Image (cartoon, helix red, strand yellow):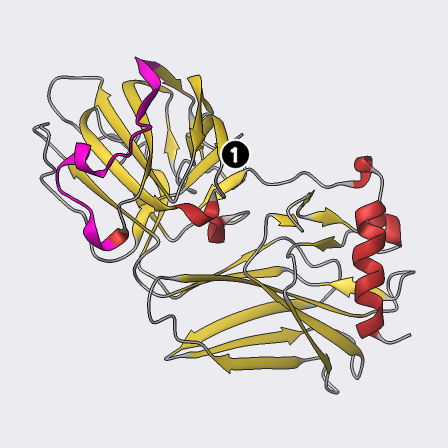
Amino acid sequence: MSIRSHLPLLLLLASLAPAGAQTSTHPITVPKVFTGTYGTTTNAYPFARTYGYFQIWYRGDSLKAPKPVLNLGWRAAPGITVQAQQLKLQIVLSSSTQGFSNLSKTFAANHGKDRAVFFKLKTLNLPAQSSPANPDVPAIWIKGDAPFLFKGPNLVVDVDIQQTTTATSTQYRSDAYTGGNILRSAEKSCGQSSLAGSYSGTKLTYTLSGAPPKVPLLFLLSTRNQTIGGMIPLPLDLSPLGMKGCVLGVDPILALAGTTDSAGSALFSGNLDPAGDTAMLFAQAVHASPANPAGLATTNVVNALLGTAGLSTYLYCWTTVGPTATSGPYTTNRSPVLMVMP
């Protein structure tokens, strides 16, 4: 049986696998390209400032409306070490029809009709952090006082920080990203192989290495990394199929067949120019392997953010709070990475 004919069988059997075989799924991560992996920088908001007003605009396709939001959080920046601290704040959520390029400096103008106080003004007890290394765990899960139903198309999050009456900075920085054309690795390979990606100009290249030589493979490409067919949560544990330690990490919309070379490598490339908003792509390889009874192994997943604008941005008041932002909105991608628990 060829690896091409293995894939439908693999997906079918995986969908029928017992619920207990499901690996721990990732929380919803916004932007979803940072699911299971950290961002590229840190941000003072929302936890490393004692006073200020911060509004973040997130493109809504990572949250898939309609979606109830019961809990949310932001990750502590990897590598930081801080003591526990208290922070008094209020969080407002809103669906928004405002787009990336037409956001107003007036905070209220960016809200939709469903604007709601998700978390009433009160004190959070932020736990101590010592080089956090699990991207599935926020600094703290913030439970809403009432559920918020995200209706789309975009999400606006306001954080009103009132721990003090004058602004000072702390070291409790959040995981964040800035810019675009970012490639990150998520999930784990169940063998010796690995998948890497690069983007230069308009050329996107994926390189498989460490697989057995001269074996068939399938390269899976998708814009989806959260569920299979909107029903089965990802990543999906493939151990019940004889693929110990392997996971399916993408919902493939394109499968390209190939063969590894004598060094166990393969390369897939093509031109992609996201002329408008930033594109998010997810790639994984499945290849023949004698190490698993099923004769197949999976690589890590490469998450790609291609483009520099249209995905998320923010505006804020840094020292003196008023109805109009003193900084932002910015014209290139940036934001702390948001986590949502429906």
From the viewer's perspective, is 153 left or right of 327? Answer: right
> Which SS class for mark 1?
loop
Pick the quarter of the image with the N terminus.
bottom right
From what the image shows, is residue 102 above or below residue 125? Answer: below
- Expressed as whole percent of the image width and height from the top left, the position of residue 311 reads 35, 54
From what the image shows, is residue 220 above or below residue 54? Answer: below
- Expressed as whole percent of the image width and height from the top left, the position of residue 55 reads 24, 36
Pick the quarter of the image with the C terminus.
top right
Question: Residue pushed farthest front?
Answer: 113
Q: Which residues are magenta?
A: 101-123
Q: Which residue is mark 1?
A: 137
From the viewer's perspective, is 111 left or right of 321? Answer: right
Q: Amino acid at mark 1?
A: Val
**Can I make out residue 244 in this image?**
no
**Can I make out residue 2 in this image?**
yes
From what the image shows, is residue 98 above or below residue 53? Answer: below
Which one is nearer the viewer's eye here, 135 or 210?
A: 135
From the viewer's perspective, is 116 left or right of 132? Answer: left
- Expressed as whole percent of the image width and height from the top left, the position of residue 105 reads 13, 42
From what the image shows, is residue 106 above or below residue 206? Answer: above
Instruction: Place residue 88 in its image quadrant.
Output: top left
Residue 119 lies in the magenta-colored region: yes
Going 79% across and 65% down the picture, which residue do you hit? 7
Instruction: Place residue 128 in its image quadrant.
Output: top left
Going 9% across and 28% down the picture, which residue do you hit? 322
Which one is nearer the viewer's eye here, 282 or 45?
A: 282
Tell me if mark 1 has few (under 14), some (14-19) or many (20+) residues whose alpha carbon lies within 10 angstroms of its own: some
Going 10% across and 22% down the picture, which residue do you hit? 166
Residue 14 lies in the magenta-colored region: no
- Expressed as whole percent of the image width and height from the top left, the position of residue 83 reads 37, 23
